[in-house]
Image: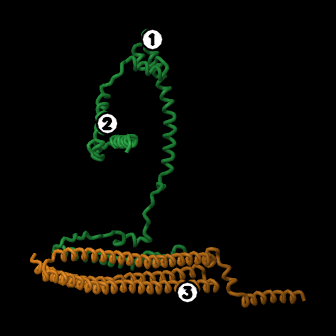
């Protein structure tokens, strides 16, 4: 195995381990996933991540640098840092500019967001009552009687005692299996209700004649 | 001369009127009823058409329910039989594993023979039970099928009786209307005939619903057969267990 292949593999391992870390997997668990010969590199990587994570909370850029950054972005002096230091400018003007800037920014952002929100709302509303793609509805039973009858869908599978060589276990296993079979056969009784499946239709037939009509 | 010719003319007209009275059918006079009176007869075909349509629709619905019932029954029985067969296969596999373990554990000839006897006893008990249950299941299923068939015959008879009564009532209306009987009278007669027909059907239907009572004895017989076979099976299993434990000393 040459150095190129080793580096390539190591890079792959480090990338993968970092992805696990980003997904929230604990470091100890990630380390356990890889062989020991990657341990040194993985330890180093996670140490660096933790050092950087700890250091970033204490990092505060100098104020001048921030002002420069903001200026370069907004290309104006009227920003939230500068207005505090502005001298000789009436306070009302500053407020007006702030409001103006805020409104301009707000409209620029709010308009597209609003349009998107309205579109989403309309689409969502039109989707109410329709099925989500890929979602298949459970097939309905053929009739009301079938729906109300037990014993079609539910699958009762006995938990059979594993073979141990023990006499009691062997006998219990046979009895459990027999009980299971019996529970399946007992469902036959619920078929009796199907005899009445046409009751409503027969009753409706008796109402075919409506004397008020004549 | 003038007086004679005038008399002759009157006589001719009178004679013509009398002849018309004798010759023209009675229906001519029936048509002279008020619109309210003749309303039922004139609109009767339309009424009957609607009634017949409802009868046909509802009879078709009964047929649909019957077909669904037979289909459901068959599906459910087939699904249950499949599950039962699968359970039996699982039981055989599991039992074979237990026997293999017991055979492996058997150290002496007596213990090996005890395992062989145990296996035979269990298989015999299962076979006896299976035969008894199959018979009970068949009796019950046949009984349900028979009840459904009897119910179908009884319902068809009730439907036919209703339809015959309807036909008789309709025929009577047509005859009465043609005979010039007052439309209101014809209507009342028809309503009374149909009310009788409907009440008869309702009475027949109530009697038919009592067919369900014949299911209970089937259920009782089935349960008795199941209980008996289960008790016999448990007794056989207890004996097999005792014999095997005696051989293994545990």
**Quarter of the image where the N terminus of chain B is located:** bottom right
Q: Badge 1, how many Cα within 10 Å: few under 14, some, many 20+?
A: few
In the picture of the structure, the residue carrying the numbered disc 3 is B168
Q: CA distance from mark 1 to mark 3?
A: 107 Å
The answer to whether marks 1 and 2 mark residues whose Cβ atoms lie closer than 8 Å is no
Q: Residue at position x 16%, y 73% from top?
A: A166
Residue under mark 3: which chain is it in? B
Q: Quadrant of residue A62?
A: top left
| Mark 2 or mark 3, whichever is nearer to me | 2
Chain B tint as drawn: orange
| Mark 1 or mark 3, whichever is nearer to me | 1
Residue A165, percent from left and from top: 17, 73
State the residue in front, A75 or A105: A75
The answer to whether marks 2 and 3 mark residues whose Cβ atoms lie closer than 8 Å is no
Chain letter for the green colouring in the rendering? A
Please give the label number shown on residue A45. Answer: 2
Residue B11, percent from left and from top: 80, 89
Please give the label number shown on residue A89. Answer: 1
């Amino acid at each position: 195995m040459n150095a190129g292949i080793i580096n390539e593999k190591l890079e792959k391992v480090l990338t993968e381990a970092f992805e696990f870390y980003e997904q929230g997997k604990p470091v100890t668990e990630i380390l356990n996933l890889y062989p020991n010969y990657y341990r040194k590199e993985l330890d180093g990587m996670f140490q660096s991540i933790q050092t950087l994570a700890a250091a970033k909370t204490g990092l505060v850029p100098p104020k001048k640098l921030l002002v420069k950054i903001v200026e370069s972005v907004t290309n104006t002096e009227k920003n939230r840092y500068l207005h505090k230091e502005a001298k000789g400018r009436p306070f009302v003007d500053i407020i007006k500019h702030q409001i103006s800037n805020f409104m301009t920014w707000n409209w620029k952002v709010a308009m597209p967001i609003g349009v998107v929100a309205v579109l989403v709302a309309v689409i969502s509303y039109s989707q109410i009552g329709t099925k989500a793609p890929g979602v298949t509805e459970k097939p309905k039973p053929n009739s009301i009687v079938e729906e109300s009858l037990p014993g079609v869908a539910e699958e009762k599978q006995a938990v059979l005692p594993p073979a141990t060589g023990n006499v009691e276990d062997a006998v219990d296993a046979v009895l459990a299996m027999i009980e299971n079979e019996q529970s399946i056969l007992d469902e036959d009784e619920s078929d009796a209700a199907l005899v009445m499946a046409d009751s409503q239709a027969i009753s409706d037939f008796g109402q075919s004649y409506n004397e008020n009509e004549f | 001369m003038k007086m004679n010719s005038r008399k002759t003319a009157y006589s001719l007209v009178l004679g013509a009127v009398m002849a018309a009275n004798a010759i023209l059918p009675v229906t001519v006079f029936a048509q002279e009823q008020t619109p309210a009176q003749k309303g039922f007869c004139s609109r009767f075909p339309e009424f009957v058409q609607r009634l017949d349509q409802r009868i046909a629709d509802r009879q078709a619905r009964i047929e649909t329910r019957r077909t669904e019932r037979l289909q459901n029954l068959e599906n459910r029985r087939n699904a249950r039989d499949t599950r039962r067969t699968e359970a039996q296969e699982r039981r055989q596999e599991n039992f074979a594993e237990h026997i293999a373990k017991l055979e492996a554990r058997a150290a002496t000839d007596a213990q090996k023979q005890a395992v062989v006897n145990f296996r035979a006893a269990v298989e015999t008990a299962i076979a006896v039970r299976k035969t008894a249950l199959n018979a009970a299941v068949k009796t019950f299923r046949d009984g349900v099928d028979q009840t459904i068939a009897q119910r179908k015959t009884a319902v068809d008879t009730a439907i036919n009786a209703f339809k015959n009564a309807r036909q008789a009532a309709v025929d009577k209306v047509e005859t009465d209307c043609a005979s010039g009987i007052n439309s209101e009278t014809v209507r009342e007669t028809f309503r009374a005939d149909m009310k009788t027909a409907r009440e008869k059907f309702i009475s027949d239907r109530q009697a038919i619903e009592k067919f369900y009572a014949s299911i209970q004895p089937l259920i009782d017989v089935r349960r008795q057969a199941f209980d008996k076979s289960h008790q016999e099976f448990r007794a056989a299993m207890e004996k097999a267990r005792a014999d095997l434990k005696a051989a293994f000393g545990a």
